[in-house]
Image: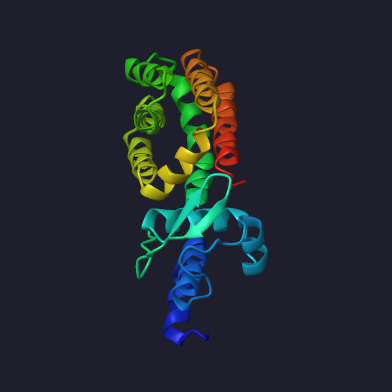
Amino acid sequence: MALSEEQTSRFRALQRYEQVAERLAAEIRSGVYAPGSRLPSERELARVLEVSRASVREAIGALQVSGVVETRPGSGTFVAARPPSSPQGHDASPSAVLEARAQLEPAVARLAALRAQRDPAAENLMAAMEAEPVDFAVWNTSDRLFHRQLAAMTGNPVLLAFADHVASLMDQPLWQRLRDDSIAVAGRTRLHVAEHRMIYEAIVAGDAEAAAFYSLQHINRVRAYMELS
């Protein structure tokens, strides 16, 4: 089915994952994928649609949030029995969020290390993430606020404003959906907390290069666990 000029213009204005989500939603509405049917694998969809697997993963996540599809562990992704008429996919792309964080957060860690001061708020947030058993809602909130608190440790209000915006993006449903999936694997939350402590202790020790290195290493691991590499 050919798109009108107006539809084509809007399609190109969307984020890549939203383009993929709209394409899949349109095929579901047209009957290409019937209610209850299984979608092709992420790898196969990426090949057919000629996009990255990360874009497909984000699109599937957005359709899950909207109730268009559901994922059954070990079985795959299926069209909902009664999918809504249109998806709601306007969250920031998690891939874009991580790309921005990779540019911002190592610089934040480096500057915070120049201050080289302990921060009770950051320490309390790390302690909350270490609690067992893991409460994913508490863990995600503490993780988001911990990274924001590192910006507060720089003493720079402009950097803190940037960090506030990033924290708001990490509170969006699509990020939370993919992040929850990524930390559901046993041991991953503990590894992330260990990385947080390495960043924090390097900052307190005044080791700017180590703080920046550990920050980037942590973001790369988050990307890998969210399967957005």
**Which one is in front, 19 or 123?**
19
Residue 12 can be seen in this image:
no
Which residue is at 50% across, 56% downward? 60
Rendered residue at 54%/29% (across/down): 215
Residue 126, position as x, y percentages in the image: 41, 19
Name the quadrant containing residue 48: bottom right
Query: What residue lies at 59% left-to-right and 24% top-to-bottom?
Result: 209
| Relative to 12, residue 69 above or below | above
**Front in this rendered view, residue 10 or 173:** 173
Rendered image quadrant of residue 112: top left
Colouring method of the image: rainbow
Provide residue 208's location: percent of width, then percent of height: 54, 22
Q: Is residue 13 left or right of residue 137?
A: right
Q: Where in the figure is residue 163, as x and y percent of width and height?
A: 38, 38
Q: Is residue 31 visible?
A: yes
Q: Is residue 168 above or below residue 67?
A: above
Number of marks in the image? 0
Front residue of 90/68: it is 68
Place of residue 4 in the rendered image (x, y in percent of width and height, measured from the top left): 46, 87
In the image, 153 versus 133, the foreground residue is: 133
